[in-house]
Amino acid sequence: MTGVIDIHSHILPELDDGSSGMTESMEMLQMAYRQGIRQVVATPHYSRRFSNTSPEQIRKLCMDVQETACRDYNMDLKIYPGQEIMYTNDVIDLLRSEKILTLADSRYVLTEFFPTAGYSDIYRAVRELTRNGYYPVLAHAERYPCLREGERIDEIRDQGGYIQLNYRSTGGKWYDGTTRWCRKVLKEEKVDFMGTDMHNVGNRCPSTEPALKWMNKHLSKLYIWKILNENPEKVTVDEKI
């Protein structure tokens, strides 16, 4: 199956602050499909606010969403289970006991933090995950101001962490500080994944085109292929990048 692979999405109905129902899930997926996305990792939140979702629920909904998309909407899509995990000290134990999900049953863990998190907290989390055999992927890394200082992105990657940016942040206005930072680290080829982080069909819909327009103008085709296709595919087959 060719096409772009999205490793960060909230398409499963009625699990978190994402899709409100199957109809909205299908509308989001249709929008993504028109933009070339053919494989999606569903990553409902795991946090104190969203702590009651079971892996079994997620797996069943992935199958239901995929079947509905293929059967009723003629979309040739593959949906994988996963979660976006708010890091806490018990995350390692929850992963080991399979109470929360990695990305597509791989060793990759989509990990998020509060925007106010300190650098030492993020660095420590990456180190603990890698020490325990996991590959931490920092969800929407542009949201953490502490990572913009010095060589911190390099330090996180040297420690075994991976960097994911949101298309929407990258495709913003040239004068926006977050957009400028996203484009800077992309030009330096320090980003490993892009993600839609789609939640709904309104203000958080899948929107890749502004970012891709900029990327196609300023980045090499090889690097774009790597972060949109090659690296995400390695997640789906559990290969280390």
Image: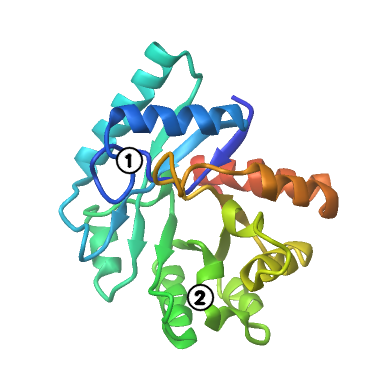
Frontmost residue, 183 versus 210: 210
Q: Quick check: 218 above or below 59? A: below
Left or right, 204 with reference to 193: left
Residue occupying the point 46% across, 49% down: 203
Q: Amino acid at mark 1?
A: Ser
Secondary-structure class at tag 1? loop
Q: Position of residue 79 (x, y in %)?
A: 42, 32
Badge 2 marks a residue whose secondary structure is: loop
**Foreground: disc 1 or disc 2:** 1
Give the number of marks. Answer: 2
Determine crowd level at label 2: few under 14, some 14-19, many 20+ residues with C-alpha closer than 10 A: many
Quarter of the rendering containing residue 38: top right
| First reached walking from the N terminus: tag 1 or tag 2 | 1
Residue at (65, 58) in percent of width and height: 172
Name the residue beneath numbered marker 2.
144
- Which quadrant, please, contains the N terminus? top right
Task: Identify the residue under disc 1.
Answer: 19
Asked if residue 24 can be seen in this view, the reply is yes
Q: Nearer the viewer, residue 225 or 173?
A: 173
Q: Real-space Cα distance between discs 1 and 2?
A: 25 Å
> Residue at the location (40% across, 21% down)?
69
In this view, the residue farthest toward the left is: 52
Q: Which quarter of the picture shows residue 87?
A: bottom left
Q: Is residue 52 above or below residue 6?
A: below
Q: Is residue 150 left or right of residue 90?
A: right
Q: Is residue 204 left or right of residue 174?
A: left
Callouts 1 and 2 close, C-beta under 8 Å: no
